[in-house]
Amino acid sequence: MASVSSFKVKVEGGYLQFSAAHFITYGGKCERLHGHNYGVTVEAEGTLSEDQLVFDFTILKRLTREICQQLNHRFLLPMKNPHIELIASADEWEIRFGEKRYVLPRAEVVELPIDNSTAERLAEYIAQELLEALTPYNTLNIHTLTVGVSEAPTQIAYCHLDLRRRLPG
Ligand SMILES: Nc1nc2c(c(=O)[nH]1)N=C([C@H](O)[C@H](O)COP(=O)(O)OP(=O)(O)OP(=O)(O)O)CN2
């Protein structure tokens, strides 16, 4: 019986990381402000292009690194978190949860369109940003894109995008 090959490329390590501060809300509580040295992995599965690549490692690394740089040394602010109150001023974000109140310079905050800064939601955000950054490239041969975000080497969350269900742009 003839076998069918399937292919996957993965980029990780090196500069595919960012250090950021955050807290998540869960179970009616709000964690203390803390930080992680996050690691990012990206996997693309698909068929081979004319050049016999799923996708060029070099480009994939560069695009992922650019997203990491936007998050590096920032506070990760989940703009859609229904459990925190956000008060904007010209230069600052005030974040309230019950009696707790944080005031942060806007320049040190990255405003994320997510509802909680869990590793899962960060992986989804990075996957969506990467998909956007891949728009100028031919990615029709890529079937799935998986982004992993680790808070530590022992804990990692993944978001898997099925690109075969992409709507024509
Ligand atoms: N599935 C997920 N679970 C948890 C997430 C997450 O993003 N996805 N996040 C957290 C917290 O944000 C927290 O940062 C976890 O950090 P952790 O190092 O595990 O905290 P601890 O101090 O409890 O663990 P140590 O191993 O003792 O450092 C929680 N869960």
Image: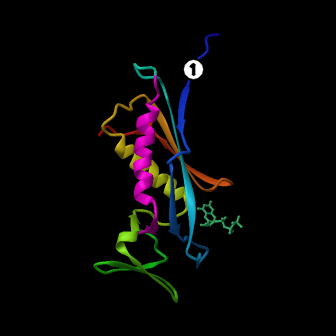
**Does 14 sit left or right of 89 as displayed?**
right
**Which quadrant is the C terminus positioned in?**
top left
Q: Is disc 1 surrounded by few (<14), some (14 to 19) or many (20+) residues within 10 Å?
A: few
Q: Residue furthest top?
A: 1
- In percent of width and height, residue 78 lies at 45, 68
Q: Residue furthest bottom?
A: 99
Q: Is 10 rendered above or below residue 17?
A: above
Residue 139 quadrant: top left
Magenta segment range? 53-79
Residue 62 quadrant: top left
Which residue is depicted at the point 40% across and 19% down?
50
- In percent of width and height, residue 107 lies at 35, 70
Q: Which residue is mark 1?
A: 5
Q: Is 8 rendered above or below residue 66?
A: above
Q: Nearer the viewer, residue 113 or 67?
A: 67
The answer to if 123 sits in the magenta stretch is: no
**Does 4 sit left or right of 72 as displayed?**
right
Q: Nearer the viewer, residue 5 or 152?
A: 152
Which residue is depicted at the point 44% across and 63% down?
114
Which residue is depicted at the point 55% across and 70% down?
24
Going by the numbered disc 1, the residue's amino acid type is Ser
- In percent of width and height, residue 86 lies at 40, 78
Ligand 1, image quadrant it occupies: bottom right
**Which quadrant is the N terminus positioned in?**
top right
- In percent of width and height, residue 116 lies at 50, 66
User: Which element is circle 1 on?
Assistant: loop
